[in-house]
């Protein structure tokens, strides 16, 4: 299992293929394997790097008592430095999109392209988002300590789907991926939840994102994700926005062919400047 010491944590990563480099950042409570179908398809023409964020997967726990989006960004910065990757295309799913977006705004000259899938910024755009991210997520920590992550997360997905039908999409794929990987420690879950429940101050300056950007979101995604997609479309200087038909909040699992084709088309147009 390849790991590399980056920002005081041993980060697990998988590197495949040759060509312009695409770095995949996964969603919360999952790991790098959520991108397996995209990596498999794209590594024939591109160098791909998929890694596990701290607290997740084979990277696992760290000694930090608090996680923040800026810590995840610092981890990514250190990982790219250790791997000698200077100008990649970043591709992030959900919370991973938040990390990729924040990185692209902080280091605009070091990103060749940005792909945001079912992503949101690290600040709230509606009362519904505040409730889901600040209140509901935080409220999951005590039940997880009592009943375990899988049972509580499954109940939370069902509850969320009751309010937003179809947002759960192909949840069997999520469960399969989670079952195949290392489990997440409860205290790590708590730290990850708190990192999403606190809005970033200051907010991300979307106008600072100079890289060409592709925004993908599911037709049945959460309303607040669609609000963020509209805001990205309005404020990121060079942006394309596409709705994935019938997909929920994991578009790349719900319709992998559509999402992979969209990413490939974006890379063919914009990845020439990426690190090789």
Image (cartoon, rainbow, N blue to C red):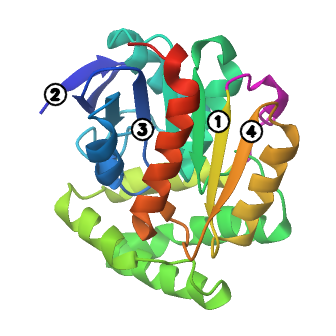
Q: Of marks 1 and 2, which one's residue comes earlier in the chain?
A: 2
| Label at residue 239 | 4
Q: Nearer the viewer, mark 2 or mark 3?
A: 3
- Residue located beneath label 3 in the image: 24
Q: Residues within 10 Å of mark 3 (few under 14, many from 20)?
A: many
Q: Which residue is mark 1?
A: 101
Secondary structure beneath label 1: helix
Q: Is residue 266 visible?
A: yes
Where disc 3 sits, the SS reads strand
Which residues are drawn in magenta?
199-211
Residue 152, given in percent of the width and then of the height, sits at 41, 78
Q: Nearer the viewer, residue 52 or 110?
A: 110
Residue 18 on image: x %, y % = 28, 21
Q: Are marks 4 and 1 in contact (CB under 8 Å)?
A: no
CB contact under 8 Å: marks 2 and 3: no
User: How far, Cα to Cα, is label 4 from label 1?
Assistant: 12 Å
């Amino acid at each position: 299992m390849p790991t590399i010491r980056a920002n005081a944590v041993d980060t697990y990563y998988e590197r495949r293929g040759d060509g312009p480099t695409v770095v995949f950042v996964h969603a919360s409570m999952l790991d790098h394997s959520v991108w397996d179908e995209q990596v498999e398809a794209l590594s024939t023409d591109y160098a791909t790097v998929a890694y596990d964020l701290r607290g997740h997967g084979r990277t696992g726990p760290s000694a930090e008592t608090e996680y923040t989006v800026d810590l995840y960004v610092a981890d990514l910065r250190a990982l790219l430095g250790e791997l000698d990757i200077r100008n990649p295309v970043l591709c992030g799913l959900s919370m991973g999109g938040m990390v990729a977006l924040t990185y692209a705004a902080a280091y605009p000259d070091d990103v060749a392209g940005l792909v945001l899938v079912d992503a949101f910024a690290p600040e709230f755009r509606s009362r519904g988002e505040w409730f889901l991210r600040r209140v509901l997520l935080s409220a999951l920590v005590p039940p997880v300590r009592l009943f375990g992550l899988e049972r509580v997360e499954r109940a939370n997905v069902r509850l969320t789907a009751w309010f937003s039908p179809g947002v759960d999409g192909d949840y069997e794929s999520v469960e399969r991926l989670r079952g195949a990987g290392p489990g997440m420690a409860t205290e790590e879950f708590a730290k990850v939840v708190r990192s999403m429940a606190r809005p970033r101050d200051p907010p991300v300056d979307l106008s600072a994102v100079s890289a060409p950007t592709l925004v993908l979101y599911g037709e049945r995604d959460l309303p607040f994700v669609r609000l963020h997609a509209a805001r990205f479309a309005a404020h990121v200087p060079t942006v394309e926005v596409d709705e994935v038909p019938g997909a929920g909040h994991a578009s790349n699992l719900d319709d992998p062919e559509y999402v992979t084709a969209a990413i490939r088309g974006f890379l063919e147009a914009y990845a020439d400047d990426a690190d090789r």
